[in-house]
Image (cartoon, coloured by chain):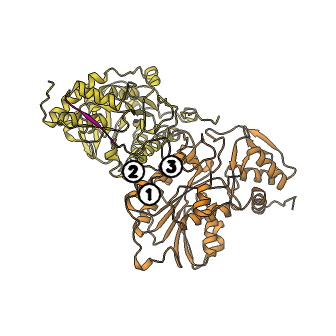
Chain colours: A yellow, B orange
Amino acid sequence: MNGGTATNGEGAVSKPPPTPSPLRSSKYTTAKMRILITGGAGFIGSHLVDRLMEEGTNEVIVADNFFTGTKENLKRWMGHPNFELIRHDVTEPLLVEVDQIYHLACPASPIFYKHNPVKTIKTNVMGTLNMLGLAKRVGARILLTSTSEVYGDPLEHPQKEEYWGNVNPIGVRSCYDEGKRVAETLMFDYHRQHGVEIRIARIFNTYGPRMNIDDGRVVSNFIAQALRGEVMTVQAPGTQTRSFCYVSDMVDGLMKLMRGENTGPINIGNPGEFTMLELAEAVKELIAPEASYKITENTPDDPRQRKPDITKATKLLGWAPTVSLHQGLPLMAADFAERLGVERKTD
Amino acid sequence: MNGGTATNGEGAVSKPPPTPSPLRSSKYTTAKMRILITGGAGFIGSHLVDRLMEEGTNEVIVADNFFTGTKENLKRWMGHPNFELIRHDVTEPLLVEVDQIYHLACPASPIFYKHNPVKTIKTNVMGTLNMLGLAKRVGARILLTSTSEVYGDPLEHPQKEEYWGNVNPIGVRSCYDEGKRVAETLMFDYHRQHGVEIRIARIFNTYGPRMNIDDGRVVSNFIAQALRGEVMTVQAPGTQTRSFCYVSDMVDGLMKLMRGENTGPINIGNPGEFTMLELAEAVKELIAPEASYKITENTPDDPRQRKPDITKATKLLGWAPTVSLHQGLPLMAADFAERLGVERKTD
């Protein structure tokens, strides 16, 4: 009945998903699947494009406004007959005939999403509305990359999907946190109201090649600072924890969720937990033994700890991360070194 | 720094409010104030119109789409030279030259806001965006009626404004709860980003004449059932509590907030707490001694208790409710009896 725990909304589903027409009855089983990826020029999006293109049986359409994504991330596929890139801002409607929509479009790093908080909310709300409208219109399945930020500064640890979160509605991070929460609401309302097939992934911190070098995230910060010979800046107190998922694991989880039968929300992330100080030490050990770090002031509402409970992903999707932080950090550092034009002393 | 308690966002305000032009330098002190009320044909909105019109020094413009509001509520002012009524849906932009905006427009009763959840979110998000855009453009001060629903099923009792809430992001009530939370976010982002003068009231259950008779809210349900000679239906378990604020007190609080110097959010509500069973008993005693009640099934995510901490309203606005439930219920019943065409046996 009522209570402090979540209902996932499943009980209220009254309409069945639309019956596939004979013309496209094979759309979730065999080739050729037409797949739209919003934000596909970004960090995670471009790795997802790689995987889907490498399967050889998909047509991939990327829609991106290039606010944080780059064409550089997709140069490998430019000109490929199964690939198309559209300059498009999801706050405007888009009509393309596709079978699946991976809706990733949104600045995900605080320095970018705080740049224009109102635009961040519009991207989450109108962007998700537009993509849901498209999914409804063409009968596509849609996956939203929500975020561990919906848990805010969690009072439960690790975070299960049933946890409702502890989010400041009026703080400087709220545009992203509340924007993603209401995007989830919209997904479920379209599911209940219109029978749209939805998938929601709550993705936790992800790292790997192609991250924006100067986006202010802790892994990219530390690696860039270490490679540049700068002092790594650890936000106080340094004992706050994060879990870091390597991007290939993340992409694998998103694809399993899209292709499975569960709406979610499902946490996708690596439960391995590290303090900021441990991360700095790992960067020092693996990438730049001569590096040093200092403690700096923190930003408002920075969560003290965040760690996914991935029981659902493991049970329902058969997914678990396979790349450890000690394996992933050097792969990311190699990419950063190349882009920064830095010769690595440890190579 | 970081933490489990709220920052109210005040620390991040970097821009001063726009300087009033000489043409309108007196806009917050003397006549003639031009005031827009969205949702002004609704229950609380129309009482606010009455008060502002009775002051005699205001021009009042009401914008309403009449989804839950009625012209009947405003008939007293039709044709008055200081009054104007516009049929307008706030999900579309509106441009009128005003000094203050009371932004009330949104279905507030579960049976109405669940009717079309996607529209409810659009009303909260695009409606608030449009009104903030108007406030920015014409230099108006804007007050949002947020809601105690932003606290969800609260784990703290009574609720202070600093409490971040316990809200299900994907339930059947989320369209309203999360919609209002993100409306608050938008208000603060416009305040921080554009210097718009904002006021946020978190209003708790309100009752009085002109409530929709069949809107499914507990006070109107009980009174209508009692007057019709039906059995009052108390949702299980009946021990869940609510606080009920008489509408004249609510309007007084909103006006004090608008005219004061605090952005809020500030709780406006009556801290007197009643269980549903006590309310049914009060209706029986005051309105229909022969009435009876039965326990019925509850709706998902119905909060178990809700009670405002009004310390801020008292200290900052000098406001406190003055009408008790035992005074207010008979006033509401008289209005309901007239509209239902019921002759009251206790008169």
Left or right relative to A49: residue A269: right
Instruction: Name the image quarter holding residue A83.
Output: top left
Instruction: Report x, y in % for residue B234.
Output: 75, 43
Q: Residues within 10 Å of mark 2 (few under 14, many from 20)?
A: many
Whether tag 3 and tag 1 are in contact, CB under 8 A, the answer is: no
First to last magenta residue range: A290-296
Identify the element where label 2 is drawn. helix
The residue type indicated by label 3 comes to Arg
Instruction: Report x, y in % for residue B216.
Output: 68, 49
C-alpha gap between disc 1 and disc 2: 9 Å
Instruction: Confirm whether residue B115 shows in the render.
Output: no
C-alpha gap between disc 2 and disc 3: 14 Å
Instruction: Report x, y in % for residue B242.
Output: 68, 48
Identify the element where label 3 is drawn. helix
Q: Callout 1: residue from which chain?
A: B
Please give the name of the residue rendered at 64% of the width and 61% of the height, measured from the top-left corner.
Answer: B250
Mark earlier in primary sequence (3, 1): 1
Q: Callout 2: residue from which chain?
A: A
Whether tag 1 and tag 2 are in contact, CB under 8 A, the answer is: yes
The residue type indicated by label 1 comes to Leu
Do dots 3 and 1 share one subunit? yes
Q: Which residue is mark 3?
A: B181
- State yes or no: residue A171 in magenta: no
Looking at the picture, tell me which residue is in the foreground, A287 or A73: A287
Q: Which residue is mark 1?
A: B129
- The answer to whether B5 is drawn above or below residue A14 in the figure is below
The residue type indicated by label 2 comes to Lys
Do dots 1 and 2 share one subunit? no
Q: Which residue is mark 2?
A: A122
